[in-house]
Amino acid sequence: MRRGARPDRRARAPNTPYTGLVRALFIVNPQATTTTSRTREVILGALASELDVTVAATEYRDHAGELARAAADDGYDLVLSLGGDGTVNEVVNGLLSTPDELKRPRYAVIPGGSANVFIRSLGVPGDPVEATGVVLEALREGREREINLGRITSDRDDRYFTFCAGFGWDADVVQQVENERANGRRATPALYAEVAVKLFFQGDIRDPSLSVVTPGRSLVGAYFALVTNTTPWTYAGALPLQPTPSSRFELGLDAFALTHSSPPLTGWILSQMFFPKGLPAHGDGYVTWHDQDHMEITSSHPRAFQIDGEYLGEREQVNFHSVPKALRIIC
């Protein structure tokens, strides 16, 4: 769907209002769990009142990435997406693959998933209609934010993540929730909690196969590990879980590793993540790292692995890198 005319393509300085009619690609995940067709029409109407909008609906996994990858070649100034954190991850990876000779479009996110961790971490409202208003206001005022991203490399991977990556138990949870969704259940906070508790008591958190290596420091025998690019790690409904509360988009990577797995101690550690200040940097049964440029996590056998809440399969070794000022966000 196209509305409006081609924009003024003159160069634009950062943090100044857009002039002319901005040409925008609006990538919509029709399977987004918290939006309806009516909500999507309201959002599109608001966007089209101020932008030259082309709408593209995703049809399969990584379709959003393919659409974002082609946006620069097609001359778009802006890419917007409506979907969850998985859609965001695909779009970000698509945008970051823009050839150097092309101008990369700016990015704006409208939440449509069950958790929307990335956009809520940016301080944008979780309501999609309200978030649309924030995006349009930011465009009018020229508000942008330049953020760091995480990057993973391995013998099977080379891709970016926006807020977290996980080895072990949390990735097992993500995998099981994806299986439940394939069977017709909605990915609600209640479903994540149900699966997490079930896997916890089944012993999925009691496998000390992980090792974490950072410059000048190493750890052997971790039960599960997280690498974060911001805080929180995730949300339980409206409550943020913060294993690395000092993690920020403007800094390097933070990490958390569980080093003891007794149910009482593990339960206490997890409960502290709900505290307003998050988990303390030091305590019994875990280790944390702050503001790291790079790190490596290995496992003595294949373990479940996820980034941004998307299950990638099993891995035995992954390298993590902080990429400064990787992405400009309209927010």
Image: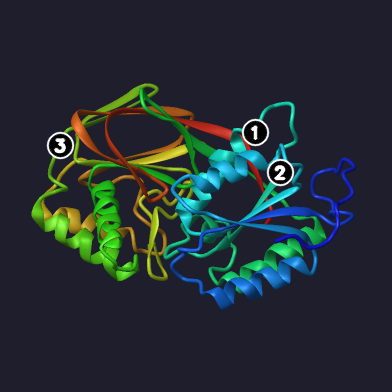
Q: CA distance from mark 1 to mark 3?
A: 40 Å
Residue at x-position 78% and y-position 61%: 51
Mark 1 or 3: the one toward you: 1
* Mark nearer the N terminus (2 vs 1): 1
Q: Of circles 3 and 2, which is in front?
A: 2
CB within 8 Å, label 2 to label 1: yes
Horizontally, is 103 left or right of 215 in the view? right
Q: Is residue 101 left or right of residue 277?
A: right
Does residue 266 appear to the left or right of 184 in the view shown? Answer: left
Q: Earlier in the sequence, mark 3 or mark 2?
A: 2
**CA distance for labels 2 and 1:** 9 Å
The residue beneath circle 2 is 105
Q: Mark 2 and mark 3 in contact (Cβ < 8 Å)? A: no
Which quadrant of the figure contains the N terminus?
A: bottom right
At label 3, which amino acid type do we have? Pro
Q: Residues within 10 Å of mark 3 (few under 14, many from 20)?
A: some
Can residue 70 be seen at all in this image of the molecule?
yes
The residue tagged 1 is: 98
* Other residues around mark 1 within 10 Å, as few (<14) / some (14–19) / many (≥20): some
Report x, y in % for residue 202: 9, 54
Q: Secondary structure under badge 3?
A: loop
Lateral position of residue 187 relative to residue 286, left or right: right
Name the quadrant containing residue 10. top right
